[in-house]
Amino acid sequence: MIEQLNNLKETAISQIKEAKNADDLEAVRIKYLGRKGEMAKVMGLISSLPDSEKPAAGRLINQVKPLLEEEISKKQKSFTLAEKQNPQSKKDLTMPGHRFESGHTHPITQTISDICAIFRHMGFAVVEGPEIETEHNNFEALNIPLNHPSRDAFDTFYIKNEFLLRSHTSPVQVRYMTKHKSPLAIIVPGKVFRPDAVDASHSFMFHQVEGLMVDERVSLAHLRGVLFEFCRQLFGEDIKLRFRPHFFPFTEPSAEVDVSCIICKGAGCSVCSQKGWLEILGAGMVNPKVFKAVGIDSEKYTGFAFGMGVERIAMLKYGINDIRLFFENDIRFLEQF
Ligand code: PHE
């Protein structure tokens, strides 16, 4: 047994030395040190030895095994070194390493932060409100009467007694004015919910950015100035703005605001349906009834408010023709931003 072990050691060492490459070496390692290798076989024989020989054999095995392991690791190092020093080596060690793929913010998140950044520079504070609202904040305080279609169960996700998924970001006006009074200038990004059938331009969940400014002598001219500056910064210097009379219960007067088509510059194209204008938001002067609901003196203070759809703005800005792309999480789409 002792002799057998010594022979095994000698042949193993010479085979390790003869190995020409890492694959050879690995084969030798498995042959001798593998689970079913030569060393394992010899160890299996120990139990059949007479007791008097067992300790010596065990001792020898405990010496041979680490010796072989060391020889193998020495040889391995010599291969790696040779590889590094060999000018013909296929490996180019000056190549950059593997880059980790890093993600980035979603195009809607980016658009929201672009919008907020512009208003922040004009002095607006960014605030948020809850997605589950009370009927009071979402409707009553905003002067939306009981018979208004948006209060219908088919037009709103009701949860239970008085609670619903907010259908717009305007209830945050109510929350903020109730707490902070005047003067104030805020911008409110967030999710809103309407049970619309999903198609290329509708989704049951989308994002809005609400704006609100209240102070003494705030006028429609301020609203127009702020929105004009916003559109110039978002869409470009040569943009034009148009106010069309409209109706919202919480603003009076109210308007829908269009920008000159950013694709055709107003000449008429398929994006603007040949009109030359694109509707981007709703706006108006805060209705005195809303001030009354939040306890602000409408004799002393006036204000303007506006609300825009973020998906719509992102679609116009990036030339996207289907709102569903934002929510499908297809990496091929998202990677482009
Ligand atoms: N809340 C309105 C909507 O969702 C938008 C709006 C906000 C209009 C503020 C006027 C003032 O359609």
Image (spheres, rainbow, N blue to C red):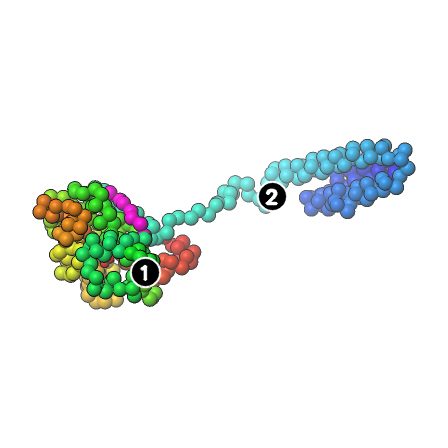
Q: Nearer the viewer, residue 60 or 126?
A: 126
Residue 154 against residue 213 in the figure, above or below = below
Question: Is most of the magenta stretch helix, strand or loop?
Answer: loop
Could you say where residue 213 lies in the image, as x and y percent from the top left? 18, 46
Residue 94 against residue 244 in the figure, above or below = above
Q: Is mark 2 within 8 Å of ligand 1?
A: no
Gap in angstroms between the C-alphas marked 2 and 1: 67 Å
Q: Nearer the viewer, residue 226 or 94?
A: 226
Residue identified by numbered label 1: 157
Instruction: Tell me the element at label 1.
Output: loop
Could you say where residue 15 lies in the image, as x and y percent from the top left? 77, 41
Q: Residue at x 30, y 51 (%)?
A: 190
Q: Nearer the viewer, residue 153 or 112?
A: 153
Q: Is residue 303 left or right of residue 87?
A: left
Q: Amino acid at mark 1?
A: Phe
Q: Is residue 217 left or right of residue 310?
A: left
Of the image marks 2 and 1, the number of the one nearer the N terminus: 2
Instruction: Tell me the element at label 2.
Output: loop
Q: Quadrant of the N terminus?
A: top right
Residue identified by numbered label 2: 89
Q: Residue at x 29, y 53 (%)?
A: 133
Give the extent of the magenta segment: 125-131
Q: How busy is the neighbourhood of tag 2: few (under 14 within 10 Å), some, or many (20 plus)?
A: few
Q: Amino acid at mark 2?
A: Ser
Looking at the image, in which quadrant does ligand 1 appear? bottom left
Could you say where residue 222 lies in the image, as x and y percent from the top left? 13, 48
Q: Residue at x 85, y 39 (%)?
A: 46
Residue 252 shows in the view: yes
Q: Residue at x 21, y 42 (%)?
A: 180
Disc 2 vs disc 1: Cβ atoms closer than 8 Å?
no
